[in-house]
Image (cartoon, rainbow, N blue to C red):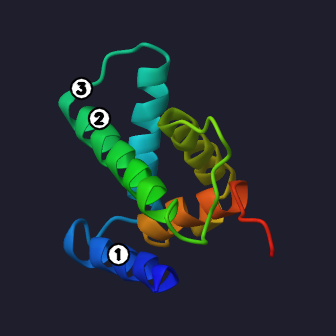
Amino acid sequence: MRNLLLPFLILLMCSTVHAASDGNSLMEGIRAFDKMDRGEDLNQSEAISWSYFMGLARGISFTGSTSDYFCFPDGFTGWQGLAVVSKWARDNPKYWHEPDVALVTRALAQAYPCPKE
């Protein structure tokens, strides 16, 4: 049952919250995340992009941590997850046309695979 919940939530988020968001728009949030990480101020548009990226990545982290899609190590933090997603997205521009929810999920699943039983 848990394995069916995450894909459903991902589809729901894609279709109702921010239907037109793909990896290109996710990168706007990532660039804002990088700017804020350097201690620079954000303008209003950047702050909105950063907030969306942070909420999306942390929401998927929370939801996915209750499934078998990814398994976080002890001591994992939300900031660590944002950094992992940010790096993965920058390193994989070939996927930027895909929905942002799928990219965040893929990044976390590749970085934190669950052990095979």
The quadrant where residue 19 appears: bottom left
Q: CA distance from mark 2 to mark 1?
A: 26 Å
Q: CA distance from mark 2 to mark 3?
A: 5 Å
Considering only vertical position in the picture, is 110 above or below 35? Answer: below
Identify the residue position indicated by label 2 in the image: 46
In front of the other: 81 or 93: 81
Quadrant in which the C terminus appears: bottom right
Residue found at the far top of this picture:
39
> Which residue is rendered at x = 69% and y = 56% of the image?
112
Frontmost of labels 2 and 1 is 1
Q: Secondary structure at mark 3?
A: loop
- Give the image location of residue 73, x and y in percent: 68, 46
Identify the residue position indicated by label 1 in the image: 9
Question: Quick check: can you spot residue 96?
Answer: no
- Give the image location of residue 13, x and y in percent: 29, 71
Question: Quick check: can you spot residue 37?
Answer: yes
Quick check: 113 left or right of 9?
right
In front of the other: 45 or 99: 99
Q: Secondary structure at mark 2?
A: helix
Q: What amino acid type should be assigned to the residue bearing mark 2?
A: Glu
Q: CA distance from mark 3 to mark 1?
A: 31 Å
Considering only vertical position in the picture, is 34 above or below 57? Answer: above
- Give the image location of residue 29, x and y in percent: 39, 43
**Is the Cβ of the residue at disc 2 closer than 8 Å to that at disc 3?**
yes
> Which residue is rendered at x = 48% and y = 54% of the image?
61
**Is the Cβ of the residue at disc 3 closer than 8 Å to that at disc 1?**
no
Identify the residue position indicated by label 3 in the image: 43
